[in-house]
Amino acid sequence: MRYSRYAIYYTFPDGPLARFGTAWLGWDAARGVAVAPPALNLPGPDIAALTETPRRYGLHATIKPPFRLAGGCTARGLAEAVAELCAGLPAVPLGRLRLTRMGRFLALVPEAAPPALSELAARVVRDLDPFRAPMTREERDRRAARGLGADRLQLLDAWGSAHVMEAFRFHVTLTGRLSDADLARVESALAEALSPLLDAPIMLDRLTLTGEAEDGFFHHIGEFALSGRAPPLPA
């Protein structure tokens, strides 16, 4: 399968939370198939309309945002670099997740994100950046037009994304932008459905290399266990 962009995600191991989240979004990125939504008491727009924006990415938390391969780099080389990096990084205990509003959309976030989480994300962004092709002028202008402040513009120019390094926030997107009315009712329905699924703490013990295929959806390429001890990040 050919991919136009790649990304490094945290993806959930198989279990009730992963199965619900995958069904909610309607796309199983691990198997590369669409799935039927769960049965919820949710009047108004159907689930497919609520999840249209995040669906093609699958259930995940972004560690290194989507990027095109730099000239001279190969998908195989990228996969080997991800495997080598993960072999030297330790797993990070995330604790329990909670449903929250992030602006106009709903997401799962850690109740208390440990500092090691941001350190891991920064390491992945930095160490794999040689594989990222520079932004085109059109890409840069489009991303900069989102009302970014000077600090976020610096991140965008340095790393191709305004949501990395000190601006990183681990989150699992569950909806697109919602109206006030939809935000309240969807939050209520999701909170009820997720309540029994969020009791167990989460261990970030793997990273998944994914690719955007010709169908516009992201597919899992490989999972890599975090199995080492990472040196401290440079000051």
Image (cartoon, rainbow, N blue to C red):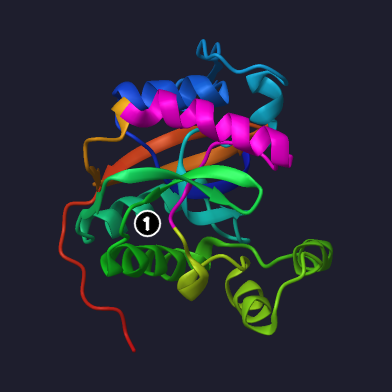
Circle 1: element type:
helix
Position of residue 70 measured from the top left corner of the image (x, y, whole percent): 61, 61
Q: What is the three-letter code of the residue carrying label 1?
A: Ala
175 left or right, relative to 205:
right
Residue 120: name its quadrant. Answer: bottom left
Magenta-drawn segment = 170-195
228 left or right, relative to 111:
left
Residue 103: name its quadrant. Answer: bottom right
Depicted 117 relative to depicted 108: above or below: below
Position of residue 76 measured from the top left corner of the image (x, y, whole percent): 45, 46
Depicted 23 relative to depicted 188: above or below: above
Of the pair 214 and 160, the residue shown nearer to us: 160
Residue 141: name its quadrant. Answer: bottom right
The main secondary structure of the magenta stretch is helix
Q: Residue at x 61, y 38 (%)?
A: 212
**In the rendered image, is residue 125 in sight?**
yes
Q: Is residue 173 magenta?
A: yes
Position of residue 71 measured from the top left corner of the image (x, y, whole percent): 63, 61
Q: Residue at x 62, y 82 (%)?
A: 151
- Structural crowding at the residue carrying mark 1, measured as other residues with C-alpha within 10 Å and reported as few (<14), some (14–19) or many (≥20): some
Which image quarter holds the N terminus?
top right
Q: Residue at x 29, y 69 (%)?
A: 115
Which image quarter holds the C terminus?
bottom left
Of the pair 194 and 19, the residue shown nearer to us: 194
Of the pair 82 and 25, the residue shown nearer to us: 25
Q: Residue at x 72, y 21 (%)?
A: 45
22 left or right, relative to 156:
left
Q: Residue furthest bottom?
A: 235
**In the rendered image, is residue 28 in sight?**
no
Q: Is residue 188 magenta?
A: yes
Would you name the residue on which mark 1 appears? 81
* Number of numbered discs: 1
